[in-house]
Amino acid sequence: MPFENWIAFAAASFVIGVIPGPGVTMIVGYALAAGRRAALFAVAGAAGGNFTAMSLSLAGVGAVLAASALAFTVLKWLGALYLIGLGLYTIARTFAAAPAAAPAKPIAARTSFLGTLAVTALNPKTIVFFMAFAPQFMAADAPYAQQAAILVASFIAITASTDAVYALLASSFAPVLRGPRVRRWAERAGGGALLGAGLATAAARAS
């Protein structure tokens, strides 16, 4: 792979990482609802999900999803329903707790990791996108597997870095959220972000 191709790919990946999408929305939602630890675990989950989605795409699954409306729709709704359910649960738990009671138990870091991993890995639009995006930067006369590995590793490293910045910035507001009333509203905002990501996933189309 020519070095200039890799530079172009890295620049494009950085732009993709900076522009907020459903993954960033989930990470910010976890940061607001559960704090920095859960948000950073969500970043790790997104990295694992991107690895899975990109690997599946470069292995040919993206072509199957692009050709099969049923497969695309099934995967899309699995991810969307999970996000919508988690968002509604996060919001509902703030109303279930009595105002004078201690804050509800925060979302576990493991939950944020697995949730972001599952939704990112099973996002059919992401898999189809990688199929069209990554090959543009590959050289026809170089080994495919080696180039694919470089692109996967580069994309994950770059987007994980931008995701981590979002996680740290969102969670930096934690000191302001110590009051029970403010914390409840912050958790509702986080739940709303997850709900919004679910609705955006549900509205996604194959092209």
Image (cartoon, grey):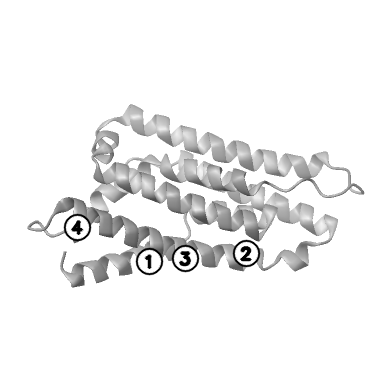
Task: Quote the CA–CA distance across marks 1 and 4.
Answer: 16 Å
Where does label 2 land, which residue?
170
Residue 99 left/right relative to 39: right
**Residue visible at 45% across and 61% down?**
160
Residue 43 image offset from top left, x and y in percent: 52, 56
Question: Which element is circle 1 on?
Answer: helix
**Residue at the spot of label 3:** 162
Q: CA distance from mark 2 to mark 1?
A: 20 Å
Label 2, residues with CA under 10 Å away: few <14, some 14-19, many ≥20: some
Give the amino acid type for the residue marked by disc 2 in the picture.
Ala
Secondary structure beneath label 2 = helix
Res. 207 visible in picture? no
Res. 178 in view: yes
Residues at marks 1 and 3, CA–CA distance in whole angstroms: 9 Å
Residue to which mark 4 is pinned: 136
Between 175 and 91, the residue placed more toward the observer is: 175
Disc 1 marks which residue?
15
Quadrant for residue 3, please give it. Answer: bottom left
Considering every residue shown, the one lying at the far top of the view is 70
Q: Circle 3 — which element?
A: helix
Q: Identify the mark nearer the N-term, 2 or 1.
A: 1
Discs 1, 4 touching: Cβ within 8 Å: no
Are the two marked residues, 3 and 4, in contact with CB atoms closer than 8 angstroms? no
User: Which residue occupies 87% across, 49% down?
Assistant: 102
Tell me the CA gap for discs 3 and 2: 13 Å
Please indicate whether residue 55 sits to the left or right of residue 1 in the image: right
